[in-house]
Image (cartoon, helix red, strand yellow):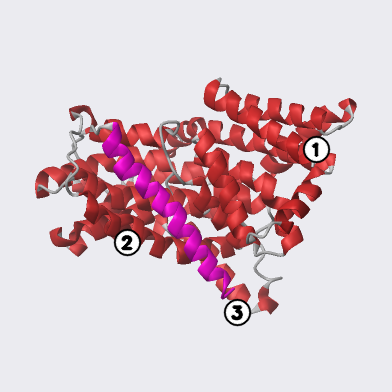
Amino acid sequence: MGNIVSVLLAVSLLTILIAWGKVPPLLAFVAAALAAALLLGVPPASIPGAIEKGIGDLLGSLVVVICLGAVFGKLIADSGAARRIATCLIAALGPSRLPVALTITGFVVGIPLYYNVGFVLLVPLIFSLVYQSGRPAVALAIPLLAGLSIAHGFLPPHPSPVALVSAIHADMGTTLLYGILVGVPTLIIAGPVFAMSLKRIEAAPAAMFRSEPAPESELPGAFNSFATALLPVLLLAATTLITTARPELNGALPLLSNPLIVMLLSYVIALFTLGLARGRRLSQLMQGPADAMREIAPILLIIAGAGALKQVLVVSGVSAELGAQLASLPVPPLVLGWSVATLIRICLGSATVAGVTAGGIVAPLVESSGVNPNLMVLAIGAGSLMCSHVNDSGFWMFKEYFGLSLRDTFRSWTLMETLVGVVGLLFVLLLSLFV
């Protein structure tokens, strides 16, 4: 019991440093790992090596995949493919189905784009639709942003799901397929259905956030945009389905089913289809990766710090003890994983921090309980999106872009994120009955 208290003290220190002290997450994680090691009786001489091993082990398998995901998403955004996808869906479904079109747009565009990039890229499109249609801005925005949020929390190649897949030894392709099965019905409820209750919220978007859309002639074609943006998903899903149906092919398809190879191949193809084939020089295209690397660096540091804390828990032996303690609780393991992520999310605000931290704590529970690790990734992902409030940057981005009061931001944004978390967990539990 004393070891569990030590872990709680270390996590409390992490919370105080980040939420109150505004300490950079990497430094806060290292401080919490150091405190945990001392409290748990790890020999002082072994502590630096454990911290370094934790950082190296977790980043070593993820850094290339996450960076490739970042540069791929940046190319999708810069080339105009994301905007082409949005305009095609809106045109195909018509003005009367704008919420449905924006829901699909958020989910499809959210797969290759990181949340903040998708938000900044697509919010001006929402504003232009508001002015054209006269519909309430918040009611149009919520379906799209729910799609972005679900992709961010549930689906690889986003950083938190990728890190969770590694931490609890899940399968990237299977997690992606299960994530889509859970994400789609969750999106319908938290997106267009919930948005119907928000029509009376009045928004006052700031003029600075309005932008002129790029000329249609400068955008890539519809097939090119959809096929290239969804290529990583199609490759991972296809290889997973093939090896599931034909297990004897497991030895023949390991290269194509590897997330690193999938992301590298997708990026090389995107460089040609969205860049070189459309007359852009390679030197121009290489400006995007530098920007993407700068954007992804803070997330990599968060994952590195989480690896340090996780390794201290493993080295001290408390990881196995914690797994046994959690497994003995009269609560389903998936609900426990979701609860841990939810608590950290409420305390710290960041969905990525909540996800990767919860993964380190819950990892031994996956082994001791025998729960499906792919479903645990999704349960933790759902918890990491819960109850966004004033300590979450996404909360303030939504409030300021749409010119809302705090009350209306809680009523719309916070409730939408909470619906995603709760409904997402319910569908994970439902899926667990069949897989």
Q: Which residues are magenta?
A: 406-435
* Residue 357 is one of the magenta-drawn residues: no
Q: Is residue 221 visible?
A: no
Q: Residue at x 33, y 37 (%)?
A: 120
Q: How many marks?
A: 3
* Residue 427 is one of the magenta-drawn residues: yes
Q: Residue at x 70, y 25 (%)?
A: 31
In the image shown, does 234 or 354 lie closer to the viewer?
354
Name the residue that disc number 1 marks.
2
| Amino acid of disc 2 | Phe
Name the residue that disc number 2 marks.
223
| Amino acid of disc 3 | Ala
- Res 307 quadrant in image: top right
Q: Which mark is residue 139?
A: none
Point out residue 430 in the picture as x, y percentages from the top left corner: 51, 69
In the image shown, does 310 or 189 lie closer to the viewer?
189
Instruction: Assign a secondary structure to mark 1.
Output: helix
- Res 372 quadrant in image: bottom right
Dot 1 or dot 3, earlier in sequence:
1
Q: Which mark is residue 245?
A: 3
Instruction: Assign a secondary structure to mark 2.
Output: helix
| Circles 1, 2 touching at the beta carbon (< 8 Å) | no
| Amino acid of disc 1 | Gly
Instruction: Assign a secondary structure to mark 3.
Output: helix
Point out residue 302 in the picture as x, y percentages from the top left corner: 60, 34
Above or below: residue 435 compared with residue 236: below
Question: Of tags 3 and 2, which is closer to the observer?
Answer: 3
Above or below: residue 294 compared with residue 254: above
In the image shown, does 424 or 206 lie closer to the viewer?
424
